[in-house]
Image (cartoon, grey):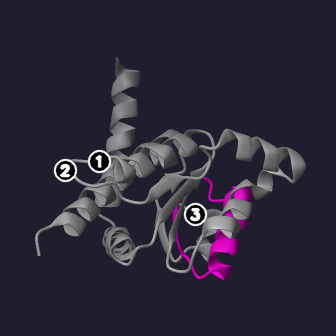
Amino acid sequence: MDKIKGIIQSSIDTKQNLLENEFLLKTIAAIIDVMVNAFRTGKKIYFCGNGGSAADAQHLAAEFSGRFYKDRKALPAEALHCNTSYLTAVANDYSFDDIYSRLIDGIGEKGDVLVGLSTSGNSVNILKAFETARKKEMITVGFTGESGGKMKSFCDHLINIPSTDTPRIQESHIMVGHIICQLVEEQYFKPL
């Protein structure tokens, strides 16, 4: 029982550290504004990650393209790893490192938003996607762990969760993602 309580407390502590970090809270607010503006100007939001972070990327994309709280129209958001034929072809013919950058090169447009989730901040395929996104004048949003890793220098906006523990980082990523989805939905669909 103590082990279970300890894990729960560790998750609470990570979120408490986030709650007390004024800079990260302001960054979340800035990301909300960026995404609302992107949707209002006809742009798209793309998500990418690996492993559990890919699952989180897909989850958050679905909150926009499906629904969150409101019964409303779909918003243009997509997780980049969902086309397995594309993913396996590019990984096989080129490199796994190129799976996201090649797709961003093909579909990304100026003003679109690319959200990359990587607990280490060092996932090569996400770094390459962010490089391509920058060349295309897209907005880059990173969700990482405490250090930000190499992604830190490629992010217009960085949510670097104050932890080095992968499960605690991922739990906080989904919480921050849900906050963003809720507030983007509220602001985008509020009556004028």
* Mark 1 neighbour density, 10 Å: few (under 14) some (14–19) many (20 or more): some
Q: Residue at x 33, y 54 (%)?
A: 74
Q: Is residue 141 above or below residue 87?
A: below
User: Which amino acid, mark 3?
Assistant: Ser
Residue furthest out toward the left: 191
Q: Determine whether, in the image, residue 137 is placed left or right of residue 170.
A: right
How far apart are labels 2 and 3 at the CA level? Answer: 35 Å
Q: Secondary structure at mark 2?
A: loop
Residue 138 picture location, percent across and down: 56, 77
Residue beneath disc 2: 70
Quadrant where the N terminus lies?
Answer: top left
- Closest to the observer: 108 or 121? 108
Quadrant where the C terminus lies?
Answer: bottom left
User: Which amino acid, mark 2?
Assistant: Lys
Looking at the image, how many numbered discs can be counted on the residues?
Answer: 3
Tag 3 or tag 2, which sits nearer the N-term?
A: 2
Residue beneath disc 3: 147
Residue beneath disc 1: 67
Q: Determine whether, in the image, residue 167 is placed left or right of residue 182.
A: right
How far apart are labels 3 and 1 at the CA level? Answer: 32 Å
Quarter of the image for residue 54 reads: top right
Q: Closer to the camera: disc 2 or disc 3?
A: 2
Q: Which residues are magenta?
A: 118-143
In this view of the protein, can residue 186 be seen by the observer?
A: yes
Q: Is residue 37 above or below residue 17?
A: below
* Mark 2 neighbour density, 10 Å: few (under 14) some (14–19) many (20 or more): few
Q: Secondary structure at mark 3?
A: loop
